[in-house]
Amino acid sequence: MCAAQGPTMALMSQTGSSYCVQSEMMRSKSGQNVILNMAGNLEVSRVKENFVGSSSLSCTSAKKTNTLHLDCAKLGWKRGHNMIVTASPPTEDAVVVAGPLTKEDLIAYLVSGCKPKEKWRIGTEHEKFGFEFGTLRPMRYEQISELLNGIAERFDWDKVMEGDYIIGLKQGKQSISLEPGGQFELSGAPLETLHQTCAEVNSHLYQVKAVAEEMGIGFLGIGFQPKWGLKDIPVMPKGRYDIMRNYMPKVGSLGLDMMFRTCTVQVNLDFSSEADMIRKFRAGLALQPIATALFANSPFTEGKPNGFLSMRSQIWTDTDKDRTGMLPFVFDDSFGFEQYVDYALDVPMYFVYRKKKYINCTGMTFRDFLAGKLPCIPGELPTLNDWENHLTTIFPEVRLKRYLEMRGADGGPWRRLCALPAFWVGLLYDEISLQKVLDMTVDWTPEERQMLRNKVPKTGLKTPFRDGYLRHIAEDVLQLAKDGLERRGFKESGFLNAVTEVVTTGITPAEKLLELYNGKWGQSVDPVFEELLY
């Protein structure tokens, strides 16, 4: 959903003859160690909030010493720039570049995500609704605080604080965070196989349930809050959400619903080069409506059918048109890292984080920030961490950071939490399947892609497309995903079983829920809390 930040990846490049080697240790104020390793991830030994000191990145290139040469886009990282990497929540010194940032620096930041195929990983994120067993009401913050503290103490997680409030947990490369309405999110570690991904999900759900059940709390796997209205949803004590809550009604009618009443599952995937990023971005955007249909799981609003199969997906169509959608420019011949940066520079900002506070900068652009022209912080210039934070406030169907995020699916039960990454890994991490997807979709027009985006939330796999239905395209796409997983050689294709049934029958998860609602549930949504209980 809105605040998903994905696996933390350190700034580096390993393309062609250029590479970075970094293995330095910083000491936190509490005396704990933080290790920056070559794999580009934080390896944390009891990470605490505040760090002291900085770490200079030494890069070796065949051409020049102390320069990060980004073959991927023929860009050069400026000599003498220093970098500090820390854990979330945002800190203004998390990634620091000496001297004013330029547009080239922002492009280089994205390029630094390029990694060779053997380094590609799978990062899965999912959100779920916590509720009281007795009343079915959403968890209050006080209960969430107790739950987070309980998980930290019992299973050795580090606490993430904002002021006096616990707002998340970290353990190695995994993190648990809170969405605006208390939705509980796991941002998984970057993992090599889907077996590891599913084991991570199972371990997380076991830990959460072990603490939550003692408190009379359960968790629901669905894409939209089925029973409660906006007025019933608690507000989490996170500064960025206060700013967003005030801004959303100015730019769309459903932004608050997005913040407080939706849950998603998404997967974050790597690319090897600019060309590889472009191909995966295009395939992901073209097929995102199919993923939305396969995982559609949000047919209820405030106790009644809402007329959609994926209300969560529908909500994004009227949240904030400046930062959402199908990004037609990705299919332009000129598209690349630079074009995405140009797009992001003009997406209105939400905030800047300074001195442990969120400063409201809504409606202003990062392009203005780059020129030192933000009225909210006059004369100040951005850091790379400001750029990283800004990228997390852009919400298209596929999002580019230093990896690609597939964002079109509803939250659901645990089998589908494993199926979503399986679907995209099979399609995008296998060269043959990826090329077949591109061949299949190459003549889809911008109007057709937008039509699918508009209609799928309501009609799912029954959406008419050309001379058939989307279900027929989904059959071919699912086969490509299975073939891609088979060629990976890890015996992962079984993770697609949950969506194979959807394609075979043409019946989405939401339609099954509606059948239950109109049948044995006696037109009550309350049984869904048991049906989709983790």
Image: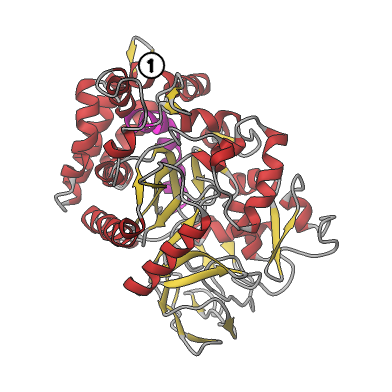
Q: Looking at the magenta stretch, what is its main secondary structure?
A: helix
Q: Secondary structure at mark 1?
A: loop
How did the renderer colour the structure?
secondary structure
User: Few, some or many C-alpha atoms within 10 Å of disc 1 (few <14, some 14-19, many ≥20)?
Assistant: some
Name the residue at 45% across, 86% down: 33
Q: Amino acid at mark 1?
A: Thr
Query: 6 left or right of 221?
Result: right
Pinpoint residue 72: horizontal percent, then vertical percent.
49, 57
Pinpoint residue 169: horizontal percent, then vertical percent.
44, 66
Query: 128 left or right of 473?
Result: right
- Give above or below for 243 relative to 333: below
Query: 77 left or right of 243?
Result: left
Pinpoint residue 19: horizontal percent, then vertical percent.
44, 72
- Between 76 and 249, the residue placed more toward the observer is 249
- Give above or below for 77 relative to 268: below
Q: Is residue 285 magenta?
A: yes
Pinpoint residue 368: horizontal percent, then vertical percent.
78, 52
Q: Which residue is mark 1?
A: 463
Question: Which contiguous range is marked in magenta?
Answer: 273-297
Residue at the far bottom: name it.
31
Residue at the far front: name it.
134
Name the quadrant containing residue 76.
Answer: bottom right
Name the residue at 31% across, 17% down: 518
